[in-house]
Image: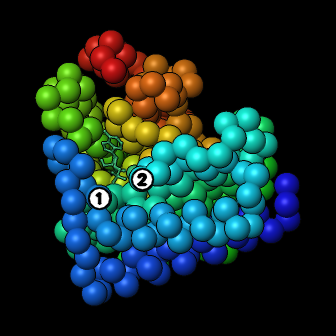
Amino acid sequence: MPLHLLQIAKKLAHDAGKLALEYQENGFKTESKGGVDLVTEADKACEQLILKTIQENFPDHAILTEESGAIGDPKAEYKWIVDPIDGTVNFAHGLPFYCVSIAIIHKGLPIIGVVEAPALKEVFWAKKGHGAFKGNSPIQVSKNGDLKRALFSFGYPYEREDPVTPMTHKLVTSVLTESRGARRLGSAALEGAYIAAGRLDAFFHYKLKPWDIAAAKIILEEAGGMMTDVTGDLISPKNGRTLASNGILHSSLVEMIKKEGGDKVM
Ligand code: 2AM
Ligand code: CA
């Protein structure tokens, strides 16, 4: 791996985060992508900043981003997966739960993840085999194996008519019965990083995209947690069903979701 890859990923997340904060301060235009999904001028500008640097420094690397899709050779040795602003609805409403999410995949294996939340002044990152960090401090998932003491987070997909919406309601109801509570933060990347840091114990969300979760997955796994499909298998990019946890709770959550029929919808 080029030695400076991690440094560049961190600098890019930081610079894009700074730019997002400037837009937050000075105002920005918002467009609808259809339904409740939004894109702002800031999403586009942050993405351009990140793309330009990757393309200048690593012309042979492939890139997948939320706003531009797939760029470059699909067989490239290195692939970047970028969400310039994860939590765009929060960003558009002036809520601080948004982040820049950058992952690097080498020959199909995730090696670097960076999630920077500029309004909260926090950066979470991990390098394969070297652990996960918040700033300079190592982080670890919670050691909580008791569902009753678990704090959950979850999300709804943008398509409100989707069959996963009633299933999400159903799962929230059972989580609220079984656990300490459920939060909805509105940024899947940040929620994954928060499980890695032990702030949350588990998270579920249907219909996520690779750019929502790629960086958080590396960080979470390096912090001792798990991110899988709701069945416990690998996440399918076709449906993006996602269950993340501290690892200890994972199999009981797979069971809980199965009991509600959550493994049957996608
Ligand atoms: P975004 O803010 O980048 O659009 C909100 O619950 C979280 O889930 C955010 O991370 C949001 O990403 C993501 N999200 C929700 N529905 C989605 C969908 N249908 N496709 C992709 N991402 C989605
Ligand atoms: Ca996103």
Inspect this view and state whether residue 20 appears. yes
Q: Where is residue 79 in the image (x, y as percent from the top left)?
A: 68, 47
- Say left or right for 125 vs 49: right
Q: Is residue 167 above or below residue 52?
A: above
- Name the kind of residue labelled 2 in the image: Glu
Q: Position of residue 103 (x, y in %)?
A: 61, 53
Query: In this figure, which residue is indicated by the disc labeled 1?
Result: 39
Q: Quadrant of residue 173?
A: top left
Q: In which quarter of the image is residue 30?
A: bottom left
Classed neighbour count for the residue bearing mark 1: other residues with Cα under 10 Å, few (<14), some (14–19), many (≥20) = many
- Name the kind of residue labelled 1 in the image: Val
Q: In this view, does 137 lie above or below 35?
A: below
Location of the N terminus (image quadrant): bottom right
Location of the C terminus (image quadrant): top left
Front-lying residue, 215 or 211: 211
Please, what secondary structure does the residue beneath circle 1 have? Answer: strand
- Say left or right for 125 vs 24: right
Q: Residue at x 33, y 80 (%)?
A: 23
Q: Which residue is drawn at 29% across and 54% down?
A: 186
- Say left or right for 206 vs 92: right
Q: Where is residue 47 in the image (x, y as percent from the top left)?
A: 48, 64
How many numbered badges does the structure rendering display?
2
Query: In this figure, which residue is indicated by the disc labeled 2?
Result: 67
Please, what secondary structure does the residue beneath circle 2 have? Answer: loop
Q: Where is residue 242 in the image (x, y as percent from the top left)?
A: 43, 33
Classed neighbour count for the residue bearing mark 2: other residues with Cα under 10 Å, few (<14), some (14–19), many (≥20) = some
Q: Which residue is drawn at 30% across and 80% down?
A: 24
Q: Residue at x 24, y 49 (%)?
A: 33
Q: In this view, does 88 lie above or below 207?
A: below
Inspect this view and state whether residue 197 appears. no
**What's the distance in space between the residues labelled 1 and 2, CA to CA?**
8 Å
Task: Tell me which numbered mark, 1 or 2, is placed earlier along the sequence.
Answer: 1
